[in-house]
Image (cartoon, rainbow, N blue to C red):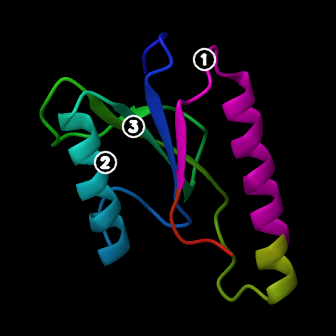
């Protein structure tokens, strides 16, 4: 990320960068934005600590990174558990965004409910 506000937050409800058709679409759009000079951070529902991780692949003056905010899912979650995990993940994502020294210039949302 940069400190001049020229980064884009891309919020997605799935793992990134590989694995599903949706992830590949988001990667293509993110790579296009990076090629035009934007620094893109894809905020995902992947389990793990919220650590900024660079994504290899896009070339250009910009970059693509990812941060996971999800929690490991139980084998067969019920609707209530899924909703609870979503609320916890959303809260962590918003806290992470608010803690950044510079907010993103744009926020893109893919999917979600």
Quadrant in which the N terminus appears: top left
- Give the quarter of the image for residue 37: top left
Residue marked by disc 1: 102
Residue 20 seen: no
How far apart are the alpha carbons under marks 2 and 1? 19 Å
Dot 1 surroundings within 10 Å: few (below 14), some, or many (20 or more)? some
Give the residue number, with chain letter if any, for mark 3: 40
Tell me where residue 93 appears, x and y as whole percent.
Answer: 69, 44
Above or below, comparing residue 16 to residue 64 in the picture:
below
Compare marks 2 and 1 and give the one earlier in the sequence. Answer: 2
| Percent coordinates x, y for residue 54 in the rendering | 33, 33
Q: Residue at x 15, y 43 (%)?
A: 57
As drawn, the residue found furthest toward the left would be 59
Where residue 30 is drawn, which disc sits there?
A: 2
Bounds of the magenta segment: 84-108
* Secondary structure beneath label 2: helix
Which residue is at the front of the view, 100 or 8? Answer: 8
Give the residue at x 31% y 48%: 30
Is the Cβ of the residue at disc 2 closer than 8 Å to that at disc 3? yes
């Amino acid at each position: 990320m940069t400190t001049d506000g020229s980064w884009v937050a891309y919020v997605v409800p799935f793992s990134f960068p590989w694995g599903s058709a949706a992830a590949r679409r988001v990667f293509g759009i993110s790579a296009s934005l990076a090629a035009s000079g934007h620094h893109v951070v894809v905020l995902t529902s992947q389990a793990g600590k919220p650590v900024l991780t660079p994504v290899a692949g896009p070339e250009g003056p910009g970059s693509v990174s990812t941060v996971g905010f999800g929690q490991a899912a139980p084998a067969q979650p019920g609707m209530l558990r899924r909703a609870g995990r979503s609320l916890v993940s959303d809260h962590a994502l918003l806290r992470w965004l608010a803690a950044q020294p510079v907010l993103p210039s744009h926020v893109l949302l893919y999917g979600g409910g």
